[in-house]
Amino acid sequence: MGIVFQPQNDENRAGLLEDFIEKAGGCAVIDGGFATQLERHGAFINDPLWSALCLINSPHLISKVHLEYLEAGADVIVTSSYQATLPGFLSRGLSLEQGEKLLEKSVKLATGARDLFWESVNKMGDHAYNRALVAASIGSYGAYLADGSEYSGYYGKDVDLNKLKDFHRRRLQVLVESGPDLLAFETIPNKLETQAIAELLEEEDVQIPSWICFSSVDGVNAPSGESFADCIQVLNTSKRIAAVGINCAPPQFVHTLVQKFKELTGKVIVVYPNSGETWDGVAKRWLPSKCFNDDKFKVLATRWRDSGAKLIGGCCRTTPSTIRGLSKVLKQGSLANN
Ligand SMILES: [Zn+2]
């Protein structure tokens, strides 16, 4: 009989992520905006499926973007499955089997890029990279609705705990079976969905660690208006959730939210805000940020680290250049030669 692979116990599961962060120097770098970079390479993503459309049309661009972020120094890369959902694929005329294959593909493209990159840097000999982890992105129910409700937190009267669990269940199963290192729940806007995720991870006996990131539109509360204390309370008892934080909020909110989260939980704090630019919904374009650029982002990131965040990256409109800067400053120059 060969080696028996023991299921991880609770401590090991949270420990996997904490050990990784320790090895990365106490703060690990997450990648940056995915759709932003895909568009820069000419991908068409103006669609309810958003960057998931590239899983069908241009998977080579997804690999390319993963490699760009790895090269920039990301220790964790996030898959292109944020808006990839089975109902979303079904509504585009794909079969359930095809939809599941695309979810699997989102993980395989990321693990493939990670393995390829790791092999190539090791051939170079001396380098300061870490073998990256792959986090499978799971967008909120609001991200699937594509009606902005991930920023309002209001899902309507018909949406209850079971409906949210049913929405997340099959995608979660397929993504976990595809072999990522982590699950990344992103832009969660309310307590109900937080609870649905915590219960689902338990029901499905998920053995890899998860992080849950909330969005925030006022820098104080969850988008639903519920306090973060209320939202975090429902996941503090979950051994399956290793990290909690904020994604896709403007960078100026992050410092006080990290301080607040440190008081609310003993879990690892994860933050990856957007660039601070704002979306003009009428003109359908991004308005340039008045005060945020990569340099400013970099300076703010050291404050987030100093106040306790241990996983730091960027969301919408951040680029490999942002992540290269973050990596340099957060690892105190250890990648300065790259
Ligand atoms: Zn974003």
Image (spheres, rainbow, N blue to C red):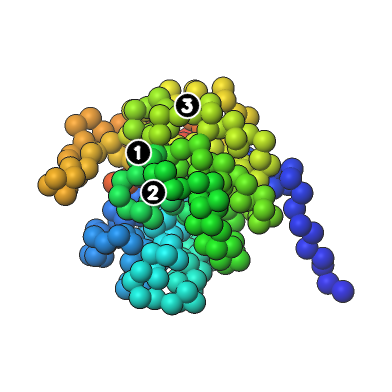
Give the mark, 2 or 3, whose residue is nearer the N terminus. Answer: 2
Marks 2 & 3, CB-CB < 8 Å contact: no
- State the residue at coordinates (40%, 71%): 90
Q: Distance between the residues labelled 3 and 1?
A: 14 Å
Q: Is mark 3 on a helix, strand or loop?
A: loop
Q: Which amino acid does label 2 sit on?
A: Gly
Is residue 90 visible to the viewer in this orientation of the structure? yes
Say whether residue 48 is left or right of residue 22. Answer: left
| Mark 2, residue position | 142
Residue farthest right in this picture: 1
| Mark 1, residue position | 152
Q: Residues within 10 Å of mark 1 (few under 14, many from 20)?
A: some
Q: Distance between the residues labelled 2 and 3?
A: 19 Å
Q: What element carries label 1?
A: loop
Percent position of residue 30, x then y: 46, 46
| Mark 3, residue position | 227
Q: What residue type is labelled 1?
A: Ser
